[in-house]
Image (spheres, rainbow, N blue to C red):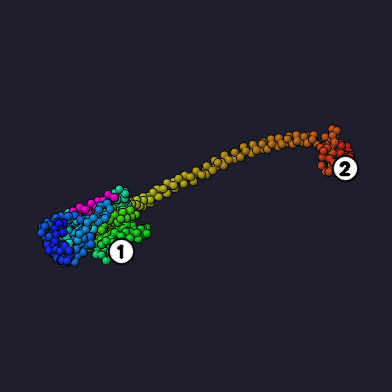
Amino acid sequence: MHKRFCNFGDNFDKMGETAITLLEFNRRVNRLLHDTSVQRCWIVAETSDVMVRNHCYMELVQKNPETGLTEAKARAIIWASRFAVLRHTFETATGQAFGNGLKVMVEVSANFHEQFGYSLVISDINPTYTLGDMARQRMEIINRLKREGIINLNKELEMPSVPQRIAVISAGTAAGYGDFIDQLHGNQSGLKFYTCLFQASMQGANTAASIIAALNRIYANAGLFDCVVIIRGGGATSELNAFDNYDLAANVAQFPLPVIVGIGHDRDTTVLDEVANVRVKTPTAAAEWLLGKAQTALESLNSISDMIANIAKDMIASARQQLAYYANTIPLTAENTITRNKSILQNYMNMIPLRAHTRIESAGKDLDVWRERITIAVEQHLQHEKMRLQTLEKQVELLSPDRVLKRGYSLTVANGRIVTDASALAKGDVMETRFASGKVISEVK
């Protein structure tokens, strides 16, 4: 091949005086490609710079898996007549819009145009390859969440028995949000819910970042809400790939409030569904789940209310029966009691005079006995006290100062006090010494 490129132009002048145009050169390259009968073949690559303008233009690149650097690149095109069929087939099978950053397996043939140069023409796409790569990426995210131990954190949060304060993450103009609000607030049971919308983009490249920002705003006011509802309705199934995002899944998994997710359809499961506390199909289904939770609590409350009412009715009926019984019994019982007590009272009235006379006689006898005993006791006490008084009189007489002085003792008084210790006297003190007969005044020298 290389030699044939070097030998273009049989009449080429080696001295450079004769040359061909670029157009003629490109035509020869084009003829060369056709002459060599380059066959169609399947290749794997990653899409980049996808642009649809009737035809679908893009670049196919191959990157080094370790460095991420581009190792090969080629322009490619899918003709409009073929692109409509291939896009429908691809998006139906994968649930993913055909765009940038997709790992694809495509059937290509080489094409060289005199004006636009070398490119590849894509004639077929194998969606199974892309589907497998998407599943692989989804599984890698799930396995990472498992390794980090956070995949079940939100699932393990206890949902309130009646979640009524609800933070809603959705696009405010989305039909799904309107369906959710109508279903929730327009319920026939009259159940009350309080919703607050946190706007977010639910489609496109900014979806994950926008929802994370909304979660951060809710987190700042987490005490005001019972749970979070993330809903998306009316969007294409192909846009669900935005919810297979690690950062978004990690934020939801670790969020402190239970999260309800209703973003797709029954057959579509995203990583976000795997980490949420509750996963439902659609926004309407999310509203129905909340209503069902509240309805169950209401039915339980009504059941308890009915049970209490029945118990109260039974108690009232029983009380009324007892009251009727007492109403019939009390008059007869009262009459019997009065008759019986009248008889007892009459007996007491008959017995009182007799018992009073008996008690008076007995008391009179007791009084005579006590009078005699008191007389004797008083006489004995007087005699005893008289003898004690005589004894004291003798003791006083023996201890009188006159008798002591008559026995030869004297009494010395100085400064108005009796002197018992010579050390209590000082020179010049005047003393009075008393005898049984007379007294002497002296001075301490």
Residue neighbourhood size for the residue with mark 2, other residues' Cα within 10 Å, grouped as few (<14), some (14–19), many (≥20): few
Q: Nearer the viewer, mark 1 or mark 2?
A: 1
Residue 276 lies, in percent from the top left, at 28, 54
Residue shown at the point (32%, 62%) measured from the top left: 198
Amino acid type shown at disc 2: Gly
Q: Earlier in the sequence, mark 1 or mark 2?
A: 1
Magenta-drawn stretch contains 384: no
The answer to which of 265 and 22 lies nearer the viewer is 22
Residue 51 lies, in percent from the top left, at 21, 64
Q: For the C terminus, give its image quadrant.
A: top right
Residue shown at the point (54%, 40%) measured from the top left: 358
Residue 187 lies, in percent from the top left, at 26, 62
The answer to which of 141 and 361 lies nearer the viewer is 141
Image-quadrant location for residue 169:
bottom left
Residue shown at the point (39%, 49%) measured from the top left: 333
Determine which residue is flagged by label 2. Answer: 428
Residue 176 lies, in percent from the top left, at 24, 63
Of helix, strand and loop, which one carries label 1? strand
Determine which residue is flagged by label 1. Answer: 199
Residue shown at the point (49%, 46%) measured from the top left: 349
- Give the spatial CA distance, label 1 vs label 2: 121 Å
Q: For the N terminus, give its image quadrant.
A: bottom left
- Residue range in magenta is 129-144
Amino acid type shown at disc 1: Gln
Determine whether, in the image, residue 20 is placed left or right of residue 191.
Answer: left
Magenta span dominant secondary structure = helix
The answer to which of 68 and 433 lies nearer the viewer is 68
Of helix, strand and loop, which one carries label 2? loop
Determine whether, in the image, residue 160 is placed left or right of residue 395.
Answer: left
